[in-house]
Image: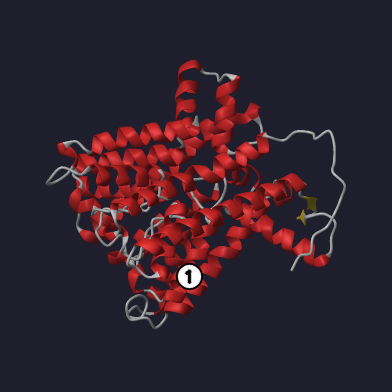
Amino acid sequence: MVALGFVAGIAVGTLLLLLPVATTGEHASFLEAFFTAVSAICVTGLIVVDTPEYWSGFGQAVIAVLIQIGGFGVMTMASVLGLMISRRLGLQTRRVAAASTRTLSLGDVASLLLTVLRTTIILEAAVTVILTARWMIGYGEPFGRALWLGLFHAISAFNNAGFALYSDSLMGFATDPWICVPIMLAFVLGGIGFPVLIELYRHLRTPRRWTLHTKITVLATAVLVPAGTLFVLVAEWNNPGTLGPLDGPGKVLAALFQGVTPRTAGFNSVDIGQMNTGTWLGLDVLMFIGGGSGGTAGGIKVTTFALLGFVIWAELRGDRDVAAFHRRVPPRTVREAVTVALLAVAAVMGSTIVLAMSSPFDLDQILFEVISAFGTVGLSTGITADLAPGHQVLLCVLMFLGRLGPITLGTALAMRSHQQAFRYPESTAVIG
């Protein structure tokens, strides 16, 4: 049902973007409209045409609506609308909503959905106000234009979409904290996951009451944000095409922005195509990991990545059980994390091989593009529009799988739990 909801959104978005009123010049081709609709509703941000120049105000509004629907979740949105009408949810609707929001309690779904809706509106409105004021005061934009810029970028940021109304994304504002910081906070809060945000709001001063999921997400975020920032800062410090021309504070702000945005916002304040190949590889890792479960970010999710780390640590210590924060992790959860991670690796590697064998671009560029699509990030070295139509369709498939794959696969694995009536005799295999 979740997958069909996204397919319906893609179909409607494609049809709307095919309308003559959606473009500023010639009508969009089917592939241009389809690719943009998939990228928007899967909150990715990869583009084959220049968003501010190619799409009209109507087309940009369609993209913004698709981003909002995709970030909030088609089924979650439907559940909220149904709740507003009937004031209650049926059991089947609760199950679908629980899968969309990654909550573990069906009884809390109704209140959770309303909290998600309120959180989205409040945070997006706050970011809109700050950005609108900055574009009016700092850059002389008229109120209407500044308001549209603020609203569009707030929606795109909170939903981790990466669409921008500037041809160079946010490169013109690389050293402006009044633009970069609100956008950065929006996509970090949107990507950390609604269950975590709600729990932090309720128990911020009592960490001992946090669930294991919240503790793992907060720890992984606290490690990856400074690690990504330091990596970009060191790797690009003297690069004349990225951080090189900036002063010290400007370098730190740009490195912080580019260290966080791969997880999976998709905005860029420096030229990604001018980065060192080693930096691309580091960003590949961050894009593959992604953000928190139950939020607007993509990737395999930080909880999956962190659990794999705890598995390795337990195995190196020779522990019988996998433990995290003095809690034993069930073996089934461990197997789910391994399954999600390995299937994601298979999807990325298979697609990379296909593109590497049939496109003229370098392997590092292709790998970056594939991971960006699967992780629903939207960063690009600049090759998206130059790929063959078949390759662009493959990226659409990756964006769809990246948005729904980890969520639906994880939920499906969790719901397939059953007691096996027998056990096979134990045996071993040589490892390593």
Outermost residue on the right side: it is 425
26 or 268: nearer the eye?
26
- At horizontal 78% and vertical 55% (from top left) the residue drawn is 322
- At horizontal 42% and vertical 78% (from top left) the residue drawn is 236
Q: Position of residue 19 (x, y in %)?
A: 19, 36
Q: Position of residue 222 (x, y in %)?
A: 59, 61
- At horizontal 76% and vertical 65% (from top left) the residue drawn is 431
Please identify the quarter of the rendering in which residue 270 is found.
bottom left
Relative horizontal placement of residue 201, taking residue 32 as reference (left or right): right
Residue 111 visible, this angle: no
The amino acid pointed to by label 1 is Leu
Query: Height in image: 319 above or below 143?
Result: below
Please identify the quarter of the rendering in which residue 346 is found.
bottom right
Outermost residue on the left side: it is 25
**Residue at which label 1 appears:** 281
Q: Position of residue 240 (x, y in %)?
A: 33, 81
Q: How is the image coloured?
A: secondary structure
